[in-house]
Amino acid sequence: MNHLEKIANKIFEVNRVTFSDDELPIEGTEHNRALYLTVKCENSMVTQVLVDNGSSVNICPLSTLSKLKVEDERIHKNSICVRGFDGGGKYSVGDIMLELTIGPVEFTMEFQVLDIAVSYNLLLGRPWIHIAKAVSSTLHQVAKFE
């Protein structure tokens, strides 16, 4: 019965990306871990996509573009400096528009391309959160699309 209830809930949540209780870490809802998604980007599945409502830009590491076999010619050169919470900055290689599918929704998003070593493959910041009309929360473990 519990399994049938989960299936029914998934049907009614067509425009949501949700996480069930069995996907919670050992700490349960008291955790404060980062929210990572797996998304389809440029026709490839990309894991370790960080949702960060503290970031004012979407970020794509240069290494991710290389793995996706995206041509360098698609990167539009710019002189944007992306600053971190520590006050340090890194100049962008440029910006690029990428096609993403997240849950049931497709997006064309601008990313700042940075030549950096990070623990994520893409970072979705406030530009994506606002365009998607998503509400992200590691406490509630849900991203709702209007």
Image (cartoon, rainbow, N blue to C red):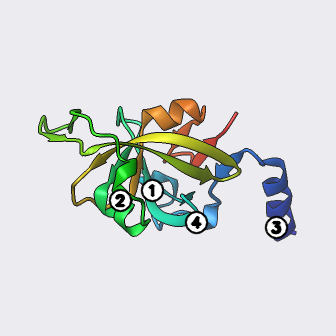
Residues at discs 2 and 3 in contact (Cβ within 8 Å): no
The residue closer to the viewer here, 56 or 26, is 56
13 to the left or right of 92: right
| Residue that lies at the very extreme toward the front in this rendered image | 73
Q: CA distance from mark 2 to mark 3?
A: 34 Å
Disc 4 designates what residue?
Answer: 23
Disc 3 designates what residue?
Answer: 2
Residue 48: percent from the left, percent from the top? 43, 62
Location of residue 55 (image quadrant): top left
- The disc at residue 79 is none
- Label 3 sits on a secondary structure element that is helix
The residue closer to the viewer here, 14 or 138, is 14
Residue 10: percent from the left, percent from the top? 78, 56
Tell me: residue 90, above or below residue 35.
above
Sequence order check, earlier mark of 1 and 4: 4
Residues at discs 1 and 3 in contact (Cβ within 8 Å): no
- Label 4 sits on a secondary structure element that is helix
Q: CA distance from mark 1 to mark 2?
A: 6 Å
